[in-house]
Amino acid sequence: MSMFDGLKFRNVSSPIHRIDPRAKFIYVCVLFVIAVLFNQIIPLLTIFLIQIPLIIAAKVRREWLRLIRGSIFFATIIFTMNIISLYFYGGQQSLESIIEYSLSMTLRFIVLVESFSIFFLTTSPDMLGLSLEQMGVPYEFCFAFTTAIRFVPVLAEEAQTIIDAQRARGLELEGGNFMKRIRNYVPILIPLIVNAIRRSLEMAEAMESRAWGASKKRTNIYTLKMQKGDYAFILISIVMLAASIYVWLFIKIPSITQILQA
Amino acid sequence: MIEVEDVYFTYPNGIESLKGISLKIEDGEFVAIMGQNGAGKTTLVKHFNGLLKPTRGRVLIDGVDTRHVSVAMLSRKVGFVFQNPDHQLFSETVEDEISFALKNFSFPEKVILERVEWALNLLDLKEYRKTSPFMLSGGERKRVALASVLAWDPKILILDEPTIGQDSYQKERLRQFVIQMNQQGKTVIIVTHDIEFVAECEPRVILMANGKIIADGEAKQILTDIELINKSSLILPEITQVFMRLNDFGFPRNVISVYEAKRLILEKLFGGIGK
Amino acid sequence: MAIIETKNLTYTYPFAERPAFKNVNLNIEMGEFVLLTGPSGCGKTTLCRCFNGLIPHFYGGKLEGEITVAGLNPSEHPIYEMARHVGMVFQNPENQLFALTVEKDVAFGLENLGLPRDEIRRRVDWSLKVTGIYDLKDRAPFELSGGQQQRVAIASVLAMQPEIIVLDEPTSFLDPLSAKNILETIYQLNKDLGITVILIEHRLDLAAKYANRVIVMKDGCIVLDEEPRKAFLDERIRLIGVGIPKVVRLYLLLKEDGVDMGKVPLSPEETSNLIREALNLDRG
């Protein structure tokens, strides 16, 4: 399992999976706003912790953890860059406040990753395509979208096969100077591209043979209907948003430094 | 010689594809590795040129552990022809395609020219030497892929599902070709589930199911064993199916060749009368 | 009544020097099971692409002569209209599966046609049951085995309820057992539902027993068009390089030595029965 499995749909049955993608999308937007709104550690940490029950309810703990572990690399970069820039350009600030600020920026990044991850782990590409369709996006785009997602693992496997086939003819992919390395990828890219084109032609043939384009008004056997639970979910998200705005406007949140000094 | 010592292999996604494989293939042998899709056949042969390294156990090619050498080094001895030629072809001309591996293996210029000539001849591709491989038909592309592997004259030749999509004439040519290569001293290993093709070639058969070897021996014995065939989701060769139903006449069970079938029937009909 | 009729049909691909096939005269009746075979490049695949309009609409090129399929001229009707009468199943199962569940894939064609939802549901369920994959309906198509995937492809085409189903080497990528099962399923469609089947195949040993007609092409021409038993006796079939079933070869070998099995066998079962009879006759 790689880190990116944390962003791929995981096909289990859970209450979170059953929530309409549009409701979940609103949730992600709300979380985005909240995460950007606050600078301080306490609210960001709160938002981070609040989502944990969701992750557990969605039965996606393992994949999510993988993603978080994978993003530690970027988190560290963010942390370090913040420290450095504040130290040299932030004016006269205490070391503690620099560290605290950098920590909250890192936390903000992790919170965003967390919410996107929940969205993609619990929303099947089919449902996503369907919600786009119902929102009025032309069918061709929705189809292209779901098909692309469907073929990502297929193309990845094909790329690996091509790499294997060329390595079996003595192609060395490691080592050599920069130019040589780029040239070494030609025997990989050309078959990949040619096969992708061939594949799309075959698919187009099959699509045409199944009456593609027959009717301007296409039916869909699945429809997304917002249920009570979905509306409740949206309501909760909006309430969270409202509460956050209220806190942001009227409540002064102490920084950790201040708490520690007191 | 290929030695596989108690090899286990698990893919990164957690699927255990080989569950304790041990076998030896001597130089000059002709082997067919058979079994259902997913039995582990291709996974196994990918260990022979180092594309895959065992999770447990080891694979030795002429005494060298595959974990200690690069794929390129092993490929000098072990030529692997993949199932789909379109996973290999990328050059502007057939000539370039055939010389690709030779250049990778740092053959001298003069030798490269000789070898390309030889490979073009061997596989009847001389007229296409300056053609783009993409302009050729499916069967021709398969020959180009084969030529490009034979060009460096590996002593072990592995063919992964070479009969898929081929018509009878192409299969017959392939069969003769494979036998020719083997007679010239090459170790030939084909991975296939084409029963009739194997029945015609009668190689040593290694039968796999669920990541294990369930049989290893003569084609005639293995392909006619109903139990083994069922375990590996294959079917009996046509002629064997005929004789399976004629046991009560005293016919042997393990008949796979049309010629033997004819002989047996004629014997039964005229043998006693002494025609 | 002829459901496919062609007169002097000739087709040349764009930029090609020679036609892919020439002067093809074909007459296929409703309910037939036609086995179309021939060496690679003989034009059989190209010919079949004419039946649902892929030629000329998708491929372009020059199509000459007359062709009528299910009463329509494919050149004058869009492919999506021909699709209601002619279903096509292709060689590679992977590239004809579009959706993330089997159910949705089988519904794909019907959705395209804009049929009402409950009609689609009905047909999808029926189609899945007929092809024996109803229990797979919520699975993801690309997780299935090759044999199962081809069944999904067949079910998707079947759901559109065409009069004709064309299958282009559907067993190429399948292991022998799956190949056998799929051909049996296709035969059931022909026998029970009366669907006209045109099957392009090299594996004559598996397919011959289902066909009522074998058409052999070479270099763009129809060379043989016969009932299977007669077709396999014809010398030309061997000269062309088409692989006849081993049981037929056995029949011919025995005939050479003066033993006539009586009938040209098309399956191992038939062969054993014929040999049994011959041996019993000899004894009795």
Image: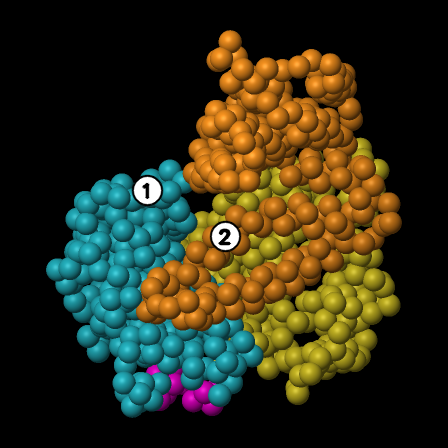
Chain colours: A orange, B cyan, C yellow
Would residue C94 be seen by someone viewing this image from the given angle?
yes
Seen in the picture, residue B56 relative to B224 is either above or below; the reply is above
Q: Residue C31 occupies which quadrant of the picture?
A: bottom right
Which residue, given by chain and number where applicable, does mark 2 sit on?
A: A156
Q: In the image shown, does A196 or C46 lie closer to the viewer?
A: A196
* Mark 1 chain: B
| Spot occupied by residue B180 in the image (x, y as percentages of width and height) | 27, 77
3D distance between C-alphas at marks 2 and 1? 19 Å
Q: Which residue: 77% across, 78% down?
A: C63
Q: In the image shown, does A257 or A205 lie closer to the viewer?
A: A257
Residue B122 in magenta stretch: yes
| Spot occupied by residue B128 in the image (x, y as percentages of width and height) | 48, 86
Amino acid at circle 2:
Ala
Furthest toward the left, the residue is B63
| Spot occupied by residue C202 in the image (x, y as percentages of width and height) | 51, 66
- For label 2, the SS is helix
Which residue, given by chain and number where applicable, does mark 1 sit on?
A: B10
Q: Which residue: 31% across, 87% down?
A: B109
Q: Which mark is residue A248?
A: none
| Spot occupied by residue C261 in the image (x, y as percentages of width and height) | 43, 65
* Magenta extent: B117-129
* Mark 2 chain: A
- For label 1, the SS is strand
Amino acid at circle 1:
Thr
Q: Which residue: 64% across, 39% down?
A: A125
Considering the whole magenta stretch, tell me its main secondary structure: helix
